Amino acid sequence: MSKINPIVTVLRDKSELLVRVAEIEDAASLVNIKFDITKEHIYMLREPYEFHNTIDIELKRINDMLHNRNKLQLVAEITNEIVGFLEFETKGIKKSEHVGSIYMGIAEHVRDNGIGTILLNTLIGWAVNNNSIEKITLQVFSNNERAIHLYKKFGFIMEGRLKNDIKLRDGSYIDNICMYKFVN
């Protein structure tokens, strides 16, 4: 079972942030924030019409995360509103159970406030203390300079570049960058 102690911190804008493990009661809020971020269609893989997450799907996801010691789902709250999340999971197969990938999103109205830094720091602390996890991986759009800067700040290294992997609405292409960090 994946656990962390809740973390309370004050953000750059002086608001108070709570970071904790996602709970069953968070399902609807997680569906909403994921859909809101998808609607921006800037840095997310899916288009809004491809978003099919439901409360039932999210409930199953949270339950799976809560009961697997190699998975972690964090939420970031300001005044009881989920404003960010970070999910980490392994593939569930023996030969690669030491490697997991992250998926993170922050609500637009609270970006540039340090929330991504706090979520990532929390995940890395958890991973370092989890003897099963050795490597954290991620993929990030090459035009997402803010996220790339954050990952580099935490020591993530570019492992590869998937050329023209993403085709935007206007027909132009961007690369998908694969990054990693060893933690154990």
Image (tube, rainbow, N blue to C red):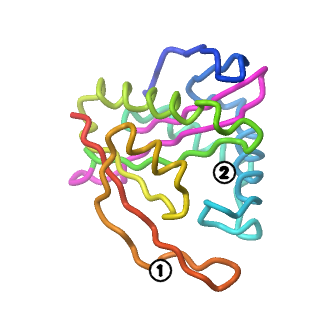
Magenta residues (range): 71-96
Percent x, y for residue 153? 39, 38
Is residue 38 positioned above or below 182 on the image?
Answer: below
- C-alpha separation, residue under disc 1 versus residue under disc 2: 31 Å
Prevalent SS, magenta region: strand
Percent x, y for residue 54? 74, 53
Q: Nearer the viewer, residue 61 or 112?
A: 112
Residue 57's tag is 2
Q: Which residue is pictured at 43% across the width and 31% down the height?
A: 123
Q: Quadrant of residue 151?
A: top left
At label 1, the amino acid type is Asn
Residue 164's tag is 1
Q: Quadrant of residue 33?
A: top right
Q: Which residue is pictured at 37% across the width and 37% down the height?
A: 154
Q: Sort mark 1 into few (<14), some (14-19) or many (20+) by Cα contacts within 10 Å.
A: few
Q: Is residue 78 left or right of residue 164?
A: right
Percent x, y for residue 178? 37, 60
Percent x, y for residue 28? 77, 40
Mark 1 or 2 closer to N-term?
A: 2
Q: Which residue is pictured at 40% across the width and 50% down the height?
A: 101
